[in-house]
Image: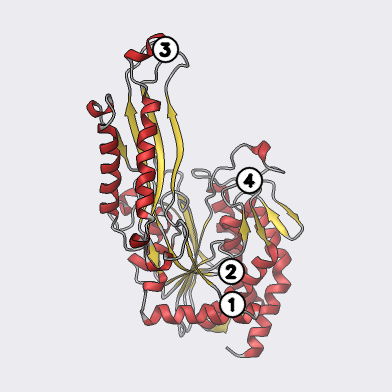
Amino acid sequence: MDPDLSTRILSAVDTLFEREIDFLCELTAHPSTRGNEQSAQAFMADEMVARGLAVDHWQISLDEIRDQPGFSPVLTPYEDAWNVVGSHRSRSRKGRSLILNGHVDVVPAGPEEMWSTPPFAPRVEDGWLYGRGAGDMKAGLASNLFALDALRALGLQPAADVFVQSVVEEECTGNGALACLVRGYRADAALIPEPFEESLVTAQLGVIWCQVHLRGLPTHVAYAGSGANAIEAAFPLIEALHGLEARWNAPACRHPDFAHAHHPVNLNIGRITGGDWPSSVPAWCVFDLRIAVYPGQDLATARAEIEAVIRDAARANPFLRDALPELVYHGFMAEGYALSDDGSAKARAAIDTIDRAHLGATGEALPRRAITATTDARFFGLYADTPAIVYGPRAEAIHGFDERVELESLRRVTRSTALFIADWCGVEPI
């Protein structure tokens, strides 16, 4: 890229950065937990319209996506699930097209009294912006838009089609990103600014969610020995699942990108409910589990292993052997994805371009990392022949109390993103 243009782009990002912070504060103030994203999506749609993008704002249809590769099962209706995509159409189309993807949904805040300040009343302090979703990943949505704004401030626009996506469901299924693919949004590369400390994500784990339903035999607690406690019956099943977790973490099972990770596969028992009365032996129990899988690990085989572990542990229980648990899959049924496994010319070109952009914005080489979480990158990389670059700002306490994103890191990522767009897509006059 012409050095003078690069300098002008970086300066334009810096000039607009206070506006970017204001934008991020306003977006973070929307409590866009799953099912409550509509106001945030309306805000994103309005901001895209104001920038001259052609806006597509639609309700996700389960019937349109349920038979597609990568679909994750859901238990709830989708009347409240809306995506937003803003399209820039180049006149010359001489460059390479690009998807700028981000998710607007956030995880629940938990007990608000355990936050220093309310989770949806964002505040800026000592160079950090606090609030639920500020880092994961509304800062990324901001950097996508303001990178384009920096070009526009110079009288330029991408010389290729660019699709700015604000999707829902990333935190539980990924079906929002899938719906964008089914709707026809394709490009030569995708950039997803998830908050992984200005590193290029080379690989990510997949995720399986599952509910385990147990039935007991109720009786008065005074005669507990004649009943069967469904909650206590869950404990040996959970212990057996941790045994599976240990086996999957064995070095021989690992994908090469995770060869040196201490404990890449994590099992989490995220929720457990059961029983009806303190003085009654509980007749039922349900617990939700999340476990990770490696890139290339077959989901059907992983499910079969989970089911066998639970079934074998249940058969060792005097009551459960005659009342085997029921497994219900809902939410993530997500494959792992490794950009490092993509040897295509498109992938090499995209990686080279983000390397140059990061170097130009920061003066430093772009570090690599494999992450033990999942992102929407898998949809582009596995199902659309599209290299997915995951590269975003530094954030802390995501999914925790006092979530925050570092503002100078956000500035650097916006600078890198603007350079990436100009290099990957080329530029033309507005």
Residue 415's quadrant in the figure?
bottom right
Q: Residues within 10 Å of mark 2 (few under 14, many from 20)?
A: many
Residue at numbered disc 2: 198
Q: Residues within 10 Å of mark 3 (few under 14, many from 20)?
A: some
Residue at numbered disc 1: 358
Q: Nearer the viewer, mark 4 or mark 3?
A: 3
Residue 407's quadrant in the figure?
bottom right
Mark 4 to mark 2 CA distance (whole Å): 22 Å
Mark 3 to mark 1 CA distance (whole Å): 64 Å
Numbered badge on residue 221: 3
Compare marks 3 and 1 and give the one earlier in the sequence.
Answer: 3
Mark 2 to mark 1 CA distance (whole Å): 8 Å
Identify the secondary structure beneath mark 4. loop
Residue at numbered disc 4: 401
Q: Is residue 183 left or right of residue 160?
A: left
Mark 4 to mark 1 CA distance (whole Å): 30 Å
Mark 2 in CB contact with mark 1 (< 8 angstroms): yes
Identify the secondary structure beneath mark 2. loop
Q: Residue at x 59, y 47 (%)?
A: 400
Q: Residue at x 70, y 70 (%)?
A: 16
Q: Is residue 155 visible?
A: no
Q: Residue furthest right?
A: 126
Give, as a three-letter code, the residue at label 2. Glu
Mark 4 in CB contact with mark 1 (< 8 angstroms): no
Mark 3 to mark 2 CA distance (whole Å): 56 Å
Residue 225, compared with residue 205, is above or below; it is: above
Give, as a three-letter code, the residue at label 1. His
Residue 395 versus residue 85: which sits nearer the camera?
Answer: 395
Mark 4 to mark 3 CA distance (whole Å): 38 Å
Quadrant of the image containing the C terminus: bottom right
Q: Residues within 10 Å of mark 1 (few under 14, many from 20)?
A: many
